[in-house]
Image (cartoon, rainbow, N blue to C red):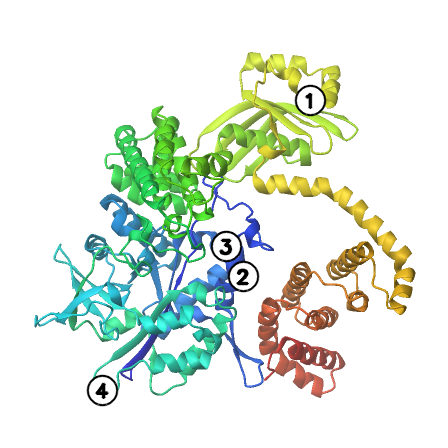
Amino acid sequence: MKPNRYICIHGHFYQPPRENPWLEAIEQQDSAQPYHDWNERITAECYAPNTSSRILDSQGKIERIINNYERISFNFGPTLLSWLETHARETYLAILEGDRLSAARFSGHGSAMAQVYNHLIMPLASRRDKITQVRWGIADFVHRFGRRPEGMWLAETAVDLETLDIMASHGIRFTILSPHQAARVRPLARGSWTDVRGGRIDPSRPYLCRLPSGASISIFFYDAPISHAVAFEGLLFDGHAFANRLMSGFAPDRDGAQLVHIATDGESYGHHHKFGEMALSRCLCDIEHSNRVALTNYGEFLEHFPPRYEVEIFEATSWSCAHGVGRWSYDCGCNTGGHPGWNQTWRAPLRAAMNWLRDEAVRIYEERGATLFPDLWLARDNYIDVILNRSRDALDRFFLRYARAELTAEERVKALQLLEMQRNALLMFTSCGWFFDDISGIETVQNLLYAARVIQLARELSGVNLEPRFLAQLEQARSNIPAFVNGAIVYERLVRPHIVDLRKVAANHAILMVAEDAPATGHLYAYEVEATDTCKRTLGERSVLAGIVKVRSTVTLQEETFMFASANLGEHKLEARLAPYEPEAYRQLQAHLTAEACDLTLEEGLDFLATILPEPTYALPSLFRDEMRRIVYRLLGDPIQTAIEVMEKLYEENAPLMRFLRTLDVPLPKVLATMSQFVLNHLLQRAIETENDSPETVRARYQEALSWNVELDAGNLSYALERVLNQLADELRLRPNDVALMQRLVGITEVAISMPFPVNLWRPQNIFYHIASANYRITKTRADSGDREAKKWTELCQQLATMLHVRLS
């Protein structure tokens, strides 16, 4: 570290856990369209772009592609990393690689920081929950990054001394806070204290915070004005201006090392601010090329310049609430500003209800777990090992280390139910549930789903139903939306329909088998399903299926066997009836399922089995959201295709007349204009998605749409082009010398950039940049020597470089 002026940019990358607590998967979120869910959308807009961010030359061409994570300080929420590992693995691995490369860049100090596990507000948590949050956050970090974390991010930077003490006792060296969280400072030599309240602390140095236990932890207080400019003042519109603002943040009259550092939500770089990741890359590049300053991260800076001052903090404060931590506990006045006239009086009763439920879950955990674990809280703290790896071997290791004795299969189920009750009791305190404006918001509903899972497990373990008293407390949480009235109504309408038990899983499997020939054995989200002794009868397009189905949770290992009958009665009429398996009742069921009875079922449904398979009857609305929509879209396929064919025929038949009307300058009747708009958009999208259609066909469809001046369906057409370009680019990565493939990619790219709306070229640009970097110079040398195939490849490469704005060197 040669200069004495250093810059560090920290990004807090986080999304709340969105998984259905029973399915362990995110169901489709309509508000994220055209993506499946918000994690997928924000990954496309932010997390992935920061792994391969562009630095442009003076002509706007891609000069370099860099991994921003290699050069900044960052933390990712553990639950978000878990999702990325499964659903966006390429991005996930690039994030890990960014940390590995940063360690080589910054004196062996990786840039990634840990985070308290599920982003709960630590000053409002119990001591036990604080310990688990820190231990789970560290364990998740070690599992992924392969090293111990030096720093840890606190949710909303919400802090108290007890939390800092727990962090320090677990080896955490530093954290980051807002300057207004500092109360006073003094030199370590124990001089007089200086009042720095109101954000007046010097943010250019680390501070030592002495803790009640006698331990200490270092704290960095970020530069608030520059951080605010990044998040809210448009500083990311210009990467050069961003760099200049950071480099102007030093005090010119101060000797010794100075650190200018900022902290914002990582989503600023691409999600909140489109192309913000590129501004970040340009900023980092400018700083790297400056001889006045150097990039660093907190671990490296702390090693070379340890604290010379100590600090006392204001406890129970945060970076996003002017009233301490009121935003997560009462109607303090902080809100999004999007709903004038609303209030947040619901926060206090929601917090009280959750606290009560947590305490009841603790009571049941201690009562029921005492015979299973010698140290209940040590077992909970180490349950993260199972969460990260639910294999049989990992489970065996966990019980060997933490169980009181070798457990029976039934005891293992009980132990896992207890631990899952505790896991969900932590998840239900995720901070986003209180952050926004109304109790009916999706973030609060998500927390209530976790609470419902706690209530369900508590009832299964103890026989006590906590739900009535929980709902009575939620009645005090008044919604701003008249239709929802209060939290209890929100729970009934938005939570209860999503509660899952083994019977519902079995019903889903029974319906899917008869509706779309799902395999008899397999996985349905977090469950293993196995249907046996099945018999099926078909009458035309109708069918009835009966048999035995066994369902087993891969999380708690609970299992149950049911006898079932399911029927596909045509159109949207899907039914299933189930009952716990009993040999005698099953024999009666088989006796009822004669050929004549099956035929009757195919005409009238499963009601005749009511004495053996009583209510409820499961139907299409009973299916999990993604499965229900998949079947609905399939059911709509034929009617929609028929409608499309009719409209295409009408368009073809009326096209001459419409062209004649145009020559007369007569506006098309609305019905013809609407029909034309739909048909022309459909034909263009079909041409884009049809592999055998040439780029010329796509261009012709586009010109036809232009000639009628129809409004193009920018969202769907852009997404279709993006998918096709991504597919072609992925194929080219595997076959970089395939001239025909490159020619098709050139043609479709030419179409994409001619559209009057933006098409995301991020992935094709990435792949082409690396292909060209590795092959262009060598292939051009062969082309210049007379190799005709190489000459053709080189020409196509040059065309593609022009269209993708990549500089060839």
- Taking 747 as reference, is 634 above or below it? above
Upstream in the sequence, badge 2 or badge 3? 3
Q: Nearer the viewer, residue 257 or 139?
A: 257
Mark 4 is surrounded, within 10 Å at the Cα level, by few (under 14), some (14 to 19) or many (20 or more) other residues, namely: few
Residue type at mark 4: give it: Asp
| Sequence-earlier tag: 3 or 1 | 3
Query: SS of the residue at dot 3?
Result: helix
Question: Residue type at mark 3?
Answer: Asn
Inspect the image, locate mark 2, and give the three-letter code of the amino acid beneath it: Ala
Pointers 3 and 1 in contact (C-beta within 8 Å): no
Q: Which residue is mark 4?
A: 253
Q: Earlier in the sequence, mark 4 or mark 3?
A: 3
Give the residue pinned by disc 3.
39
Which quarter of the rendering shows the N terminus? bottom left
For mark 2, what is the residue?
A: 44
The percent coordinates of residue 405 (x first, y second) are: 28, 31
Whole-angstrom CA distance, mark 1 to mark 2, is 45 Å
